[in-house]
Amino acid sequence: MPWLSTLMAVPVLGAVGVSLVKSDKLAKQLALAVSLVVLALTGAIAAQFSPASPARFQFVEVYEWIPRFGVHYGVGVDGIALVLIALSAILVPIVILASWHDADGSGAAAPPKRSVKTYFALLLVLEAMMIGVFAATDVFLFYVFFEAMLIPMYFMIGSYGGAQRSYAAVKFLLYSLFGGLLMLVAVIALYVVAGKNTFMFPELIAAVQDPTTQKWLFAGFFIAFAVKAPLWPFHTWLPDAAAQAPAGAAVLLVGVLDKVGTYGMLRFCLELFPEASKFFTPLVIVLAVVGIVYGAIVAIGQTDMKRLIAYTSISHFGFIALGVFAMTTNAGAGATLYMVNHGFSTGALFLIAGFLIYRRGSSRIADYGGVQKVAPLLAGTFLI
């Protein structure tokens, strides 16, 4: 059974179904049901995954896509990709439940009523893109998913976000497109220099031997991933996007989409360009440490709850990048564990902040003095 293709096809077909039903309530219920099916399929894949397997990737599917240029539809998972796909599959149904009224135009801080069906269809399309980017074993296919993720997130921020949603959405899009453009140049150059007539990742590992060429290609990939992560000083789009996005979209933006950056560093930068990675390690470690300290200090001074969480995430991503470029087995495992833990903890923070904002109509921290007296369970969950 083509497990991974099925895993991507189900939310896409679900999005089509959601957009076609007539009732908003039915659209929400269908979106939730589809996300639970994806979660069940992910559980089935995880149950069959063998950590002891000698194969580099499992559940591999490879089909010719553009034979003339050696582009394949190639998907497969290893342990790192599987846990990040599982993170996506777990968060999406939680986000759908938490976003039940995000597009209804109800609630103190809600924007005017917009298409409910479109919102939940975009959530499902985004889920398919997130699964695809972690499962891709063809570098060109990875790039396609890397860029395609921008589209549903752009519309979720720009159409369903806060008062400055248009500014935040355009800033998010421009930063991501800039990084993606550099990556596209590097992907094409890798194809030409490697001379393998293929974009399949396993065949391109260490295919480029010239140190100078490796450094240039590494820079193209790394900057794209640093923007996506976001690593200091490529981080400035995140606080605006996270602050203006609806709570559910913010969960997926910071909880999953940003992990594509650190996943890309771990998967592509270290393995495709090992010598260049060693050369740039001191610089990356400096950027990571600056991001850790900078994100934490700036977070202290925030007056907006969602911006506070966004800046703490910048600090967290510094730790993840530090683990990736420590280049040891334990550090790589720790960076992966950190990605998963950060996805759950930061996702929970954004959801609770969203609950508070939905009731009070404000994201200012100062407006919530004494909230623990009237909402002790919510405050306790926030603390945890």
Image (cartoon, rainbow, N blue to C red):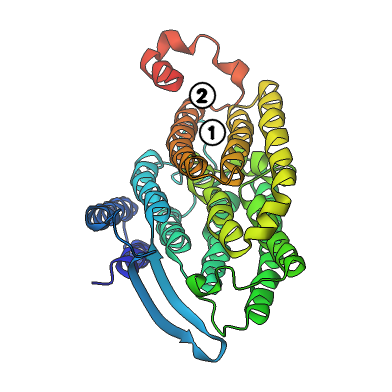
Which badge, 2 or 1, comes first in the chain's sequence? 1
Q: Residue at x 62, y 23 (%)?
A: 364
Looking at the image, residue 205 sits to the left or right of residue 34; the answer is right
What quarter of the picture does the C terminus occupy?
top left
Looking at the image, residue 361 sits to the left or right of residue 122; the answer is right
Q: Position of residue 175 (x, y in %)?
A: 70, 55
Assess whether mark 1 and mark 2 are in contact (beta carbons under 8 angstroms). Answer: yes
Q: Amino acid at mark 2?
A: Arg
Q: Position of residue 81 (x, y in %)?
A: 42, 55
Q: Residue at x 39, y 64 (%)?
A: 56
Q: Which residue is mark 2?
A: 360
Q: Which of these two is toward me, 208 or 134?
A: 208
Q: Which residue is mark 1?
A: 109
Q: Is residue 315 above or below residue 263?
A: above
Q: Amino acid at mark 1?
A: Ala
SS under mark 2: helix
Instruction: Using a 10 Å C-alpha cutoff, classify the residue at mark 1 as few (fewer than 14 neighbours), some (14 to 19) or many (20 or more).
Output: some
Say which quarter of the image contains residue 373.
top left
Q: Is residue 68 above or below residue 306?
A: below
Say which quarter of the image contains residue 269.
bottom right
Q: Is residue 318 above or below residue 382?
A: below
Q: Residue at x 70, y 48 (%)?
A: 167
SS under mark 1: loop
Q: Separation of disc 2 and disc 1 at Cα?
A: 7 Å
Q: Position of residue 4 (x, y in %)?
A: 33, 66
Residue 133's mark?
A: none
Is residue 173 visible to us here? Answer: no
What quarter of the picture does the N terminus occupy?
bottom left
Is residue 140 visible to us here? Answer: yes
